[in-house]
Amino acid sequence: MSRYKLDNGWIVMREGDQPAILHVFPVPNSLFRKEQVVEIPDDIYQDIESGETRVKELFRKHKLHDYIFQWDSRKPTTSPKYESTKNKFFGVDFLATDENGSYYLMYELSRHGGGHRKIPISKEIYEEARTGKYSTSDLFKKYNLYHLDVSENDVKP
C-alpha cells in the first residue's frame, strides 16, 4: 500500500489497483469542517505520487476542492480498508493493538514532518476502540488520555 501526507495533514492512500483515497480532516478556519473519505482520480494521485503534496497547488491544478464538495453529496461507498485481526483494530484514524496483554493506541501526528505516537491504554479502552464508534479525539476526551500525548511516546522510524 502506498501512503502520502499532504502539507495540511490530509492523507492519500492506494492499495494495489484499488482507487486512490483522500482522507480529509477538518481544517480550522476553512470550508473543510468535517472528516470524510474521498475517492480521487488517477491524474490527481499520480501528481501526488510524483511529489506534489501542496494542497493549494492541487486545488489550483486539479480543482480538488470542487471534487471534494461534489463527492460529499454522493455518499462515498469506498473507504480505505485494512484487515483487522484479533490483536489489531484499524479505526478511522488510529490502530489499537493487543501485544501479549499490553494494549496500545497508535495514531499519526499532525505536526510538520508527521510521525506516529503509540500510547499505552487499558483493556477497557482497547475494547471500546474496537467497537468502531470512536475517533482518536473521541477516545482522548472520553478517557482523558491527554497526559499520554507526549513526545516520549513517539514511534521511532
Image (cartoon, helix red, strand yellow):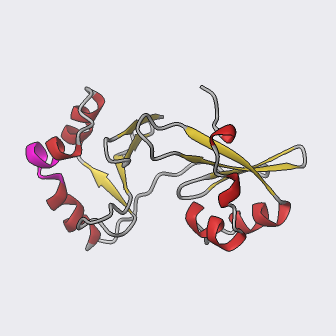
The structure residue drawn at horizontal position 47% and vertical position 51%, both measured from the top left corner, is 80
Nearer to us in this view, 28 or 105: 28
Q: In this view, does 134 lie to the left or right of 5?
A: right
x and y percentages locating residue 132 in the rendered image? 63, 67
Q: In this view, does 99 lie to the left or right of 69?
A: right
Whether residue 114 is in magenta: the answer is no
User: Eyeballing the image, is 24 above or below 7?
Assistant: below
Residue at the right extreme? 101
The span picked out in magenta is 59-64
Magenta part mainly helix, strand or loop?
Answer: helix
The quadrant holding residue 6 is: top left
Q: In this view, does 84 lie to the left or right of 112?
A: right
Task: Give the number of marks.
Answer: 0
Q: In this view, does 60 lie to the left or right of 140?
A: left
User: Eyeballing the image, is 119 above or below 91?
Assistant: above
x and y percentages locating residue 52 in the rendered image? 23, 32
The structure residue drawn at horizontal position 84% and vertical position 61%, both measured from the top left corner, is 123
Image quadrant holding the C terminus, namely top right
The structure residue drawn at horizontal position 43% and vertical position 36%, both measured from the top left corner, is 3
x and y percentages locating residue 21 in the rendered image? 36, 49
Whether residue 61 is in magenta: the answer is yes
User: Eyeballing the image, is 114 above or below 24?
Assistant: above
x and y percentages locating residue 32 in the rendered image? 28, 65
The structure residue drawn at horizontal position 9% and vertical position 46%, both measured from the top left corner, is 60
